[in-house]
Structures are given as structure tokens and as C-alpha cells.
Amino acid sequence: MKKGSCWCLIVCLTGLSCTTVFAQEPGGNSRMIRIYEDNDAINLYDIGSDKGYTNGTRLDFFWQQQKRSFLSKLLPAAGANSINTHGWGVMQVMITPDIITRRRPDPTDYPYVGALFATRSLHSANPVKKLSLQSELVLGVMGPPALGEETQKLMHRIIGAQQPRGWDYQKPTDLLLNYNLTISKQLWQHRQWAEVIGNGQIYAGTMLNGAAVGATIRLGKMNPFFNGFIQQFSTDKTQTNRWQFYFTLQPGAELILRNALLEGGVFNHNAKLPDDGYEVQREFAEQEKRRIISRIDLGAVLSKGNVGISFTQKSSSALFKGFSRQEVGNISLHVAW
């Protein structure tokens, strides 16, 4: 079943992408690859513990194109003057308990769960209105077909870390289908080195339901935010000085109505784990999830020409009550052309 589910995702990704024509936009970098890694072992404030959201690995391909295919029409643009950056991506995420040495996890701890999904996105930035719409379609699976167990055990074997023992109790297989939309509007700007942007977000589907509000503060030497997504991490050859170096601060608050990765999927949430008694305790423990999350992300971006690298320290309230804040670091590499 694992191999069949993975092949299904690959076929969907390949088939849908064949409907899109990649058009080279004149006047600068118009394509970019991003390699993205979240991990609680690379953060600045805490030693990696595997508790809660422990890892997220992602690969994206972005391209600028004004012409829109049938699929991209489901993703809104920011107006006639917008710079439209389309994207395909694939991501795997893992959530694990604080204590991974137990064969049967503590029912009051975080669950074991893996997710594997493909994304189709559009970042539409309007430099005239100082407005951007960032929309995303998500399709994937959670549970054993997501290969979370195999990935974590392999990585722990490579680095010589303690092997997780409780993956037999991971959340069961289910479908993940989501639609995410973020609206960003410039609130204030001082010349070319300081700006404040307000953000609002909604997401709905079988994976995550909720909303968020926040702000993005950027300080330093940088290309304008609304000149397109690729330009935030690269500078084309038409510019005399091709360096960017800036800091980001992103405070926010999030309302989580339902999170399938913690509560189980829509279709198989009543499926029993190996021990029925354990499942009864788990249902009681799930009453302790937080619905309102505070978060603050601190980051830095350094780019020279076509290559950029970013680091972000992500800090948020614990997803379960009684746990300390979630601390995860992100390193991303961007290569444009």
C-alpha cells in the first residue's frame, strides 16, 4: 500500500504539471528552485527533542508566467499589474512524541504521524497596489504511506541518534486535501530598507482548518517585496549591486479549528490503533489541544546574484497544553535563473 500511494502522488503531480506551459519572462530571473528544511535540531534556543512538529523537508520549483492554465485559474491574481510566480512542490512532515524510547507512546504526549503531499501554488504580487495574494492547493496522504517512520529511522541511524520505537501507533492512513490563501498588504515603508506588511490567512480542507493574522517586518538591503517572489531571494544581471542582506520579524496569532495531523483524518479518524485501551486514553487526551496559537519568527536572508540562503527561527505555542513552546529552525537554499 505504501508504494501504491507514493506512485499515485507522483502520477497526479506529473499529470497536472503537463497542462502548464513554462514561459520564460524577459527582464531578469524568472525561475527558481528552493530546498527547504525545518528541524527542531537546528534551532537556536532549544536542543532537538523530537517533540511535536519535529521535521519538514520540502522541494519547490517556481516560475514567473502571466499566462494562466486551467488549474492556475483556481488561484487568484492580485490585478492586471501583478507579477505572477507559479509553483509546484512536494513536502514530507513528521510529528512525534517528546519521549520516543517507549514502544507504546504515552497517550498524553504528541502522537506519531507523518504526512506527504504535493502543492500547486501562485504568488501574485502587485507592485502598484502593494498587495499580494499567495494561494496554494494541497493534495497528499497521512499515515504509513507518508513514509514518516522509514525517514526518521533512517536519519537517526545516519546521525547515531536514539531510534524511535512507537511508530506502530501512528495515526492511520487518510486523504489530505487543502486550500490555503494568504493576503499581504504594505502598511508602512521607509525608503528601500524598512517596511511593514500586514498578513491575513485562511485555510480549509481535510488537513487543516483555521485562520491567522500577523505582520512581516523587513530591515536591511533588499529588493521590494512586491516585485515578485523570486526577487526576494535573488537579483538579476541588470542590477549593478546584486547583494541582498536583510532581517525579518514575523509575529502572529493563529486559530486552529481542526488539525488532522493531531486529531486524525476525516475519513479514518475512528480507525483503531493496535491497542484498544490506548485509543480510549488518546481520545481523552485530545481534549487538551490548543486552539489559539501565538507565534513569532525571526529570520535573515543573504543573497548574491542568483543564489540566496535564509535562516528562520520559528517559535510558537505548544500544540498541546502543558508542553513548552515549539522551537524549530529552518534553512532554505534558493537558486534562480
Image: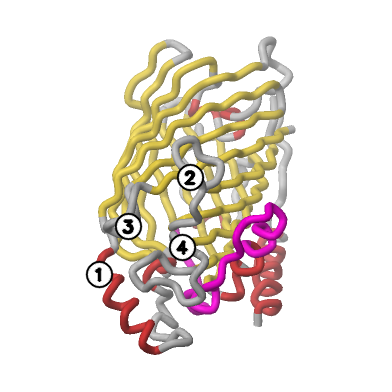
Mark 2 residue type: Val
Quadrant containing the C terminus is: top right
- Residue 333 spot, x, y in % from top left: 66, 37
At mark 2, the secondary structure is: strand
Residue receiving disc 4: 99
Q: Could you say whether the residue bearing mark 3 is in a helix, strand or loop?
A: strand
Disc nearer the start of the sequence (3/4)? 4
CA–CA distance between discs 4 and 1?
A: 20 Å
**Regarding mark 4 in the picture, which secondary structure is present there?**
loop
Amino acid residing under circle 3: Gly
Q: Which mark is residue 328?
A: 2
| CB atoms of marks 4 and 2 within 8 Å | no
Mark closer to the observer (2, 3): 2
**Residue 301 found in image quarter:** top right
Residue type beneath disc 1: Gln
Q: Which residue is mark 3?
A: 210
- In the displayed structure, 121 sits above or below 33; it is below
Say if residue 174 shows up in the picture. no
In the image, taking residue 255 as reference, residue 18 lies left or right, namely right
Q: Which residues are magenta?
A: 152-179
Around disc 3, counting alpha carbons within 10 Å, would you say few (fewer than 14), some (14 to 19), or many (20 or more)? Answer: some
Q: Quadrant of residue 168?
A: bottom right
Mark 1 to mark 3 CA distance (whole Å): 17 Å
